[in-house]
Image (cartoon, grey):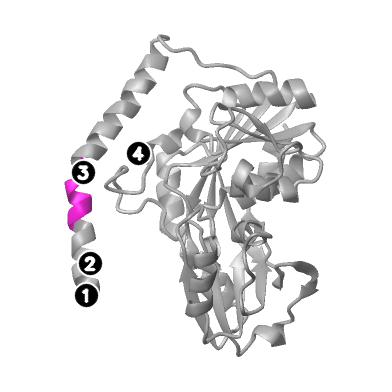
Amino acid sequence: MKSSRAYFIKALLYLLFPVSLLYLAALKSKELLFAVSLLKKRQLPAKVISVGNITLGGTGKTPHVLYLAGVLKDKNLAVITRGYARKNARKIIFSKEEMSPEVLGDEPFLLASELSGVPVVVSKDRFAAGLAAVEKYSAKTLILDDGFQRRVALARDLDIVLVDSMNPFGNGRLFPSGILREPKSALLAADVIILSKCDAAETTELEAEVRRLNPGALIVKSRYAPDFPVNIRDNSQKLRLEEISGKRVAALSGVGSPEYFEKLLSGFGPKELVPVRFLDHHYYSAADIRKIDRLASSCDMIITTEKDAVKLINRLLPETKLPAYVLPVRVKLVSGEAELRARLNG
């Protein structure tokens, strides 16, 4: 069954390859329009630091934005983000006025919750959002979340691109026959390239390839440093190692890279880890809670991601039958931290 499913997926991706060529042609056409000045690149009246990637999801942009915001918190900072999968059509939303994952989107809500005092401005139009942040909050530094693909349209002072060490470029093909949003050669436009999740894969060959693609970029390596899980509804209740080790744990996630989340949990020594996976940016319903209870019925506890937790803590949702905890994680730079901080503060 698994082999036939893999064959079907491979055949489907092959059939989608012509669409990928059309997608590439559209990318190149847009670049040409800016190159010949038929379209004008716009400049915001603030320092702009972009955090992005060249693949679809799962590279860890949100934790890295949190890290960068911690470094830049004294720089009159605001975060600009699209708010993917948000359930609100307003052109611009300010986190200080609207605080719910449905309105802001799950990732902007998590950012706003963690970044006390730092405004998060949500809009598909990053230029309009940047202007609003400058006018409303007197922002002098803007972190542009997921902004790499807009570099031809919006000027920036520093382009940081994340590459997932576990799955850097997929099958090497462009969307929709692969996971690439742009050709690998687009990395040449990056100022800083961060190899994320470097603890989960051997990175020697990847680093060599990235250096070949962009010899002048600063290459940084990062991993996630997990803390002990805390109760999803009472963050004063933290699990001790002996309460996880040897237990059956349901790993609940709706993220781009569930494998890495599960790998982090396995470091706590559970007897068994039961994956309970939903699609990235999934919003949970009462039916989903019943499904989670069913899939986790053999377990002692449920542990989920921070991004999922903000959607599970909903007064309209029933609680899970098992105790539920969230795994806090923070980015830890393994190499290149001093150089990156110098560029951020330059």
Give the mark, 1 or 4, whose residue is nearer the N terminus.
Answer: 1
Give the secondary structure at mark 1: loop
In magenta stretch: residue 13? yes
Q: Type of residue at label 1?
A: Met
Mark in the foreground, 3 or 2:
2
Q: Splitting the image into 4 quarters, where does residue 131 fall? A: top right
Label 4–label 2 contact, CB within 8 A:
no
| Real-space Cα separation, disc 4 to disc 3, in angstroms | 14 Å
Give the mark, 4 or 2, whose residue is nearer the N terminus.
Answer: 2
| Real-space Cα separation, disc 4 to disc 2, in angstroms | 27 Å
Provide the residue span drawn in magenta. Answer: 11-17
Question: Residue at the spot x=41%, y=53% of the render?
Answer: 168
| Real-space Cα separation, disc 1 to disc 4, in angstroms | 33 Å
Residue linked to disc 2:
5
Mark in the foreground, 4 or 2:
2
Residue linked to disc 1:
1
Mark in the foreground, 4 or 3:
3
Residue linked to disc 3:
17
Label 1–label 3 contact, CB within 8 A:
no
| Real-space Cα separation, disc 3 to disc 2, in angstroms | 19 Å
Kindly identify which numbered label has been placed on residue 255: none
Query: Residue 79, image x and y in percent?
Result: 68, 36
Q: Is the stretch drawn in magenta largely helix, strand or loop?
A: helix
Label 1–label 2 contact, CB within 8 A:
yes
Query: Residue 178, image x and y in percent?
Result: 31, 48
| Real-space Cα separation, disc 1 to disc 2, in angstroms | 6 Å
Answer yes or no: is residue 182 visible: yes
Question: Is the C terminus in the top left, top right, bottom left or bottom right quadrant?
Answer: top right
Question: Residue at the spot x=75%, y=20% of the render?
Answer: 135
Kindly identify which numbered label has been placed on residue 183: 4
Give the secondary structure at mark 4: loop
